[in-house]
Every structure is written in C-alpha cells, then in structure tokens.
C-alpha cells in the first residue's frame, strides 16, 4: 500500500505567496500616492510616467540577470538576497526629495524586485509535480492581488495619519519579517528534513524529469544565446511581451482612472481598487484548477494548458466595454476591469508554468528571467509610446476618457494575439533537451 504524501510543499507555496504579496505591495504604493507626490514635486503625467519607466527599465535588466543568478545560487540564497535588497529599496523611497531621487530609488526597487518571479517559478518547479504546478503558481501569484488589495486599504490612511514617507517605510519593512521565515522553513526538497519520503517521491514523480535534469550542473548552465535559439523560449517571451504590460497598466493607472473619470481621491479609491484585485484573486487560483482538472481527466499536459489559456484570453475581451458601461454606473466598470484582471492572473499562472513544462528544472530561472525581461520591455514601450504621450495629450484637451478607451481596447485584444503567436511557434508539446 502506497504511503500518502504529506503537504509540506504547500508550506513552501505559502512562503512564496507571502513574498509575492510583499513584492506587489511595495511596487503599488507609489500609484496610491500619486496625488501627494504630484503636489509636493509638481509632477505632471509625463513626470509620473518617467518614474514608472525608470522602474520598468531596471526591472527588465534585473529579470535577465536575476534568472541566471538564481539558477547559479539556488532558490534559498537567491530569493533571500533579492527580498532583502528590494525591502531596503522600498524603505529608501522615504528619503527621496526630488523627481530624480524617486527615479533612482524606483530603479533600485525594480532591479531587486526582479528576483521574485524567477525564484518563485523555480521553487515551484523544484517542489511540485507538473500536474500541480499551475495550481501552485496560481496560488502564489494571487499574492500579487492580495498586495494590490492591501495597498489601497492601508497606504492612503497611513499617508493621511503620518505622511506619505511613512507609507513607504511601513510597507517596505514587512519584507524583513519574510526573510526570517524563509531562513527557518526553506530548503530544497532533497535536503529538507521536514519532508517525508512519500512526498519527496511524489514531487519527483514526473517520468520525463527523473534523472534528466540532474545532468545539468550549476557550472554547465546553457548561455542566454543557447536558450534564445529555442522556439519555446520565444513563445514564452512573446506571450509575456504582449500581456505583462496590461497588468502593469492596471497597477499604475487604475487609481488615476478612477480619479479622472469619477473624481475619487485619497481614501475614496480604496474600495474600488481593492474590489478589482479581490475579483482577480479568484482568477489567479482558479486559473490553476482548470488545467489540473483537465490533466486528471487524462488530457495531455500541454493541451490542457493551452486550452485553459485560450479560455482566459477570451475572458479579457469584455474590458473593451468597461468605459461605456462605466458611464452608466462606476461599479460596472470596476466589475468588468476586475474580471479582466482575474483572467489575466489565470493566464499568468499558466504561461509561467509552460516554462517548467518545456525546460529542465535547472534552466527554469534563466528562461523565466528572459521572458520576464521581454514582458517588462513591453511595459516600457506601452508607457513610453502610448501612455505617456497619449495621456498627456488627451488630458491637455480635456478628453482623457478617450485615452482610457484606447487602452481598454488594447487590453481586450492582447491575449488572443499572444495565444495565436505562441500556438504558431509551439503547436505541440516538445520538451527542450539541453
């Protein structure tokens, strides 16, 4: 009789969920203080976009470097130092006294925060069999929603009570609590004494991954050029390039949309913003359940993954009508944006998991970093060539609602385009043999 595997892997999932929550809490703070910072530093939309672009450019570079570094250092050390550095950077926002100063600390935050997702995806690949990876990814990725929910429910109130600088200090300090927990509870499965043999065997139960990934040593990591020679890398990277900017758009501009369209400011935006990310939490978690249920019905892993992603891509399309329905009632816009954000998180849980579906475990950090870099570059392009010029122009002629209508149209079509390109590049499951 086979021994039932334990559940320690879910303790690890909860740790990376906590880290992702902190990651998004720290990056979301600035969007909720936009009015305060605009008043203090005399910003316009272009200045705010420049600060946002500084973060994204640094994040792009950081993702490429972090993925390779984490593959070399391992998840325990790599994740620890990444979280330590971004927590310090988040606190240091309180010391910024100019637009240039904000650009510098935002760049430091972007560079260090880049370590979260390569570390988290690699951790999931190490701790979960393929059939559970999308679910585990969906659960930890929902930390992004929780961070985005906590931010509007706390940051405006901290700013009103103690000033905007303390909002950065308090939220940035939470990461130091996580560092202690990580050191206490984390170790790779093969060296984790709290892990039973039955659960270790279950984690390593994928037949196509037994022994094969161990042939790659830390000293023989394939180069970036080698990884970019595979269509699988490009499928993941283009998918991220087209869809990551949409999530960044929600994160940085949703408070401004609510203020511009409905006159909400300060604590008034807390409930609508929190509602959007509360809805998106359900998509993040369910996004992992759907492919898992299809795999359990004997669907091939890749077919289950791609079918689920196509469903989620169609679920984003109604956001095209968010502003039209929002003119009738603000909460209709909030609900539709929330549903689109939910579909994005479901998509995200699965596109991340395609990396560990297709690549050996010891290259997962590097490939995730490459794709994440492309996603961040896409976000920079969107900010630089669309949001910055477009929003400044339309606000100047008092037609900012036109700019948001264009952006919602872009949001509605991005995922279907990404899915089609990914399907053309990798129509069938073909694991990379390095």
Image: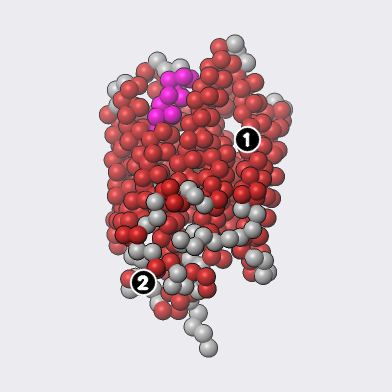
**Residue extending furthest top?**
397
How far across and how far down the image is residue 429, in percent? 61, 60
For the stretch drawn in magenta, the main secondary structure is helix
7 displayed left or right of 348: left
Circle 1 residues within 10 Å: few <14, some 14–19, many ≥20: many
How far across and how far down the image is residue 325, in percent? 72, 30
Image disc number at residue 390: none
Q: Which residues are magenta?
A: 45-55
Q: Which residue is mark 1?
A: 411
Q: Secondary structure at mark 1?
A: helix
Colour mapping:
secondary structure
Residue 8, quarter of the rendered image:
bottom left
214, 201: nearer the viewer: 214
270 displayed left or right of 330: left
Q: Residue at x 35, y 21 (%)?
A: 99
405 displayed left or right of 85: right
Q: Are marks 2 and 1 in contact (CB under 8 Å)?
A: no
Q: CA distance from mark 2 to mark 1?
A: 42 Å
Q: Earlier in the sequence, mark 2 or mark 1?
A: 2
Q: Is residue 403 above or below residue 18?
A: above
Q: Which residue is mark 2?
A: 190
Q: Residue at x 54, y 47 (%)?
A: 234
Q: Is residue 147 magenta?
A: no
Q: Residue at x 36, y 45 (%)?
A: 65
Q: Is residue 48 magenta?
A: yes
């Amino acid at each position: 009789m086979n021994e039932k595997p334990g559940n320690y892997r879910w303790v690890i999932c909860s740790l990376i969920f906590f880290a992702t929550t902190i990651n998004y809490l720290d990056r979301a703070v600035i969007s909720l203080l936009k009015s305060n910072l605009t008043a203090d530093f005399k910003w316009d939309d272009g200045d705010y976009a420049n600060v946002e672009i500084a973060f994204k450019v640094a994040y792009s570079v950081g993702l490429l470097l972090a993925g390779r570094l984490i593959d070399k250092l391992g998840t325990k050390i790599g994740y620890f130092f990444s979280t330590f550095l971004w927590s310090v950077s988040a606190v240091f926002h309180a010391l910024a006294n100019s637009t240039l100063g904000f650009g510098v600390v935002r760049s430091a935050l972007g560079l260090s925060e880049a370590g979260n997702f390569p570390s988290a995806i690699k951790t999931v690949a190490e701790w979960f069999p393929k059939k559970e990876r999308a679910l585990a990814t969906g659960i930890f990725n929902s930390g992004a929603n929780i961070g985005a929910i906590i931010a509007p429910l706390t940051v405006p109130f901290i700013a009103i009570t103690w000033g905007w600088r303390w909002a950065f200090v308090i939220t940035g300090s939470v990461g130091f609590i996580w560092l202690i927990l990580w050191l206490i509870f984390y170790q790779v499965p093969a060296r984790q004494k709290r892990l039973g043999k039955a659960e270790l065997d279950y984690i390593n139960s994928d037949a196509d991954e037994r022994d094969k990934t161990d042939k790659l040593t830390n000293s023989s990591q394939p180069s970036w050029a080698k990884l970019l020679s595979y269509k699988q890398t490009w499928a993941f990277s283009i998918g991220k390039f087209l869809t990551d900017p949409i999530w960044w758009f929600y994160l940085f501009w949703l408070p401004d949309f609510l203020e511009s369209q409905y006159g909400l400011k300060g604590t008034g935006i807390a409930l609508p913003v929190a509602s959007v990310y509360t809805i998106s939490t359900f998509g993040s978690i369910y996004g992992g359940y759907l492919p898992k249920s299809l795999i359990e019905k004997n669907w091939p892993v890749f077919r289950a993954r791609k079918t689920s992603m196509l469903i989620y891509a169609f679920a984003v399309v109604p956001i095209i009508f968010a502003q039209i329905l929002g003119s009738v009632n603000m909460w209709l816009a909030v609900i539709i944006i929330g549903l689109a954000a939910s579909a994005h998180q479901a998509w995200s849980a699965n596109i991340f998991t395609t990396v560990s579906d297709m690549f050996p475990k010891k290259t997962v950090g590097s490939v995730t970093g490459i794709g994440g870099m492309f996603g961040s570059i896409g976000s920079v392009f969107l900010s630089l060539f669309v949001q910055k010029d477009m929003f400044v122009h339309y606000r100047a002629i008092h037609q900012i609602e036109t700019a948001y209508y264009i952006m919602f149209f872009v949001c509605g079509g991005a995922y279907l385009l990404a899915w089609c390109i990914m399907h053309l590049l990798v129509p069938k499951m073909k694991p990379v043999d390095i």
